[in-house]
Image: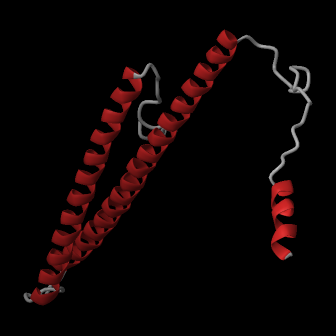
Amino acid sequence: MGIFCTIPFLLSCQKTVHSEKIVSQHDIQFSGHSQLELNRQIGLVEDNLKAFELENEWLDARSRVLRAEIRAGESTKSLLKLERELLKYQKLQNSFPHETGFISERDEIEWKSKLKVKKAEVKKLNALVRLLSRDMNALEAKLHRNGFGSVKNAIFTNPLAE
């Protein structure tokens, strides 16, 4: 008896109700533009997105260059300060009346070693700036090939350095 009850039940579950409602153009909110106009707008948005991506790439590259320039500048400043200190003690050494001098040979070797390390660091960081600047120039060329302009070098300038 259970089988006789389940067959009609299963058959009744397979019936689908079809909606007779027809969706009209008035039910969907269109912008009212033609397909040609929509294609044009899509092209403009795609161009803007490409420009934003290129600008973001440029900003990332410029940020890397700036960070490298800051590190190189800080390293150069540190080197110059060290040289200034060494020069100050060298002047004291030259004016010291005793024949052995004011600065021991060990201290002089240590200072010269520090100076050599600082010079190597400055050289390395300046090479990094040149490498990143070269990459930046390649990106500038890519921007110009794609019809975009860009800011050359720094936006902010130091009037005292000019």
Q: Position of residue 133 (x, y in %)?
A: 31, 42
State the scheme by which the image is colored. Answer: secondary structure
Q: Is residue 148 above or below residue 18?
A: above
The outermost residue toward the left is 99
Please tell me which residue is depicted at 84% across the width and 48% down the height of the picture: 15
Please tell me which residue is depicted at 86% across the width and 75% down the height of the picture: 1
Q: Position of residue 48 (x, y in %)?
A: 58, 27
Q: Which quadrant of the structure image shows residue 141?
A: top left
Of residues 126 and 128, the one nearer the viewer is 128
Is residue 155 at all visible to an observer of this figure? no
Q: Which quadrant of the structure image shows residue 146?
A: top left
Q: Position of residue 138 (x, y in %)?
A: 30, 34
Q: Position of residue 150 (x, y in %)?
A: 46, 28
Of residues 116 and 87, the one nearer the viewer is 116
Q: Is residue 80 above or below residue 158?
A: below
Q: Is residue 138 left or right of residue 55?
A: left
Q: The C terminus lies in which quarter of the figure?
A: top left
